[in-house]
Amino acid sequence: MSHAQDGATIFKRCAACHLPTGAGVPGAFPPLKADVAALAGSPTGRRYLALVVIRGVSGPITVGGKPFRGTMPAQSGLNDEQVAAVLNHVLRGSAAKPFSAKEVAGFRAGSASLNSAAVARLRTSAAGK
Ligand code: HEC
């Protein structure tokens, strides 16, 4: 199975909340679109995206100008390659540099003490607000 197919397969578990299109549900599950592509353009944003999947995220966060105050559980059981594959699936069609398993491994290292609220604060610093 190619990595691209892997990403689509893994995304099925994400689609339960974010919908198969990634459009999300207002007030509950954020869209995985323009904001994710923008976050993937900075080192802090890339760390945030990887740790959202690895550690979970618990806002408040603002996505697409709309507030979200939910909790995404850590997506346990995904290895570095699978985290990279699913993020690359989300980013397909954008100009963002693809994630590699090695990059994800670097973000995972030392992240065990970060809880989902700390991950949300990474987004705030990545977005500069
Ligand atoms: C059980 C529901 C659920 C599942 C499953 C889930 N998420 Fe989430 N996700 C959320 C919620 C809720 C938030 C927003 C949390 C908040 O309000 O702070 C979120 C936030 C995010 C964000 C942050 C977006 C941004 O702009 O900051 C990303 C990226 C993301 N999810 C990707 C994924 C991926 C990839 C998967 C699958 C591997 C996944 N999610 C699975 C519920 C889920």
Image (cartoon, grey):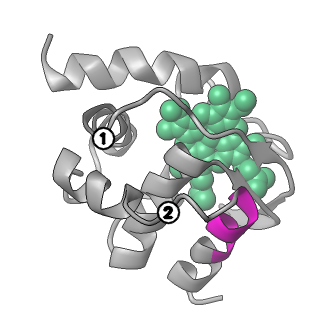
Q: Is residue 51 magenta?
A: no
Q: Quadrant of residue 93?
A: top left
In the image, 43 versus 28, the foreground residue is: 43
> What is the magenta range?
116-121
81 displayed left or right of 52: left
- Kindly identify which residue carries mark 2: 111
Q: Residue at x 30, y 53 (%)?
A: 104
Q: Ligand 1 closer than 8 Å to the CB at disc 2? A: no
Q: At which x and y percent is residue 5?
A: 24, 16
The amino acid type of the residue labelled 1 equals Asp
Residue at far top of view: 1
| Screen quadrant of the N terminus | top left
35 relative to 98 in the view: left or right:
right
Q: Residue 85: x and y, percent?
A: 28, 34
Name the quadrant containing residue 120: bottom right
The mark lying in front, picked from 1 and 2, is 2
Task: Return the residue at label 1.
Answer: 80
